[in-house]
Image: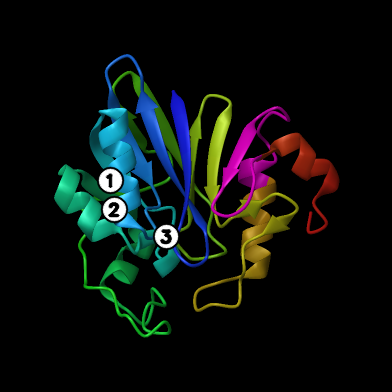
Amino acid sequence: MKVRILPVGPLFANCYILTCEEIKEAVIIDPGGDADYILREVKRLRVDVKAVINTHGHVDHIAADEPVIKATGAKLMIHEDDAAMLKSPARNLSLLGGVPLPPLKADRLLQDGDTVAFGSEALEVIHTPGHTPGGICLLADDIVFTGDTLFAKGIGRTDFPGGSYETLLRSIRERLLTLPDDTRVYPGHGPPTTIGQERLGNPYL
């Protein structure tokens, strides 16, 4: 699986394009802005995008959902507990920025343990509430995409509606720190890290 990282939007959220190089199918994780930039990269890679997956429902991770889906025909996926955020500018925080997002309906509501397949690759859904009620991470072998659950030397904010500091820490300890130390972590913002590095050096853990 090939991983392409695109920092997008005013908060430089990490949008990921994951490609099965054998079959040239792809999924896009968190297209949080700059749709033209994302779509140019899709065209350059010459891949068939099968799904857009939101790790959670905040504006900086969903802002380009609509144009990317329209251009690629991909199916939109989000955890069932965050699905309502796609329809509410207040809940997805786009109202705060003065540019409310149009309401969207997910094609597939994800649950813990689900699998999203593309080509010969697959992602396992890990429900990690705390930043939002429906926050998820996506695991593929020795790689995990953590959205705003876990960062290099940091964790997600919990002061937005639906956030819980205690729940977030429990999610990280019970669902992520149980992974092998060499598991590569691709977060929603900032540089990659590993589970081992965060186990030893993350001040919140």
Does 191 lie within the magenta span? yes
Question: Which stretch is magenta?
Answer: 174-192
The x, y position of residue 161, in whole percent, is 50, 79
Packing grade of label 1 (10 A; few <14, some 14-19, many >=20) is some
Name the residue carrying label 3: 61
Mark number for residue 11? none
Amino acid type at circle 3 is His
Question: Quadrant of the rendered structure where residue 198 is?
Answer: top right
Does 141 lie within the magenta span? no
How many angstroms separate mark 2 from mark 3 (CA)? Answer: 15 Å
The x, y position of residue 151, in whole percent, is 66, 52
The residue at 79%/54% (across/down) is: 205
N-terminal of the pair, mark 2 or mark 3, is: 2
Name the residue carrying label 2: 36
The residue at 48%/57% (across/down) is: 135
Q: Are marks 1 and 2 in contact (CB under 8 Å)?
A: yes
Drawn side of residue 165 relative to residue 9, left or right: right
Q: How many numbered callouts?
A: 3
Amino acid type at circle 1 is Leu
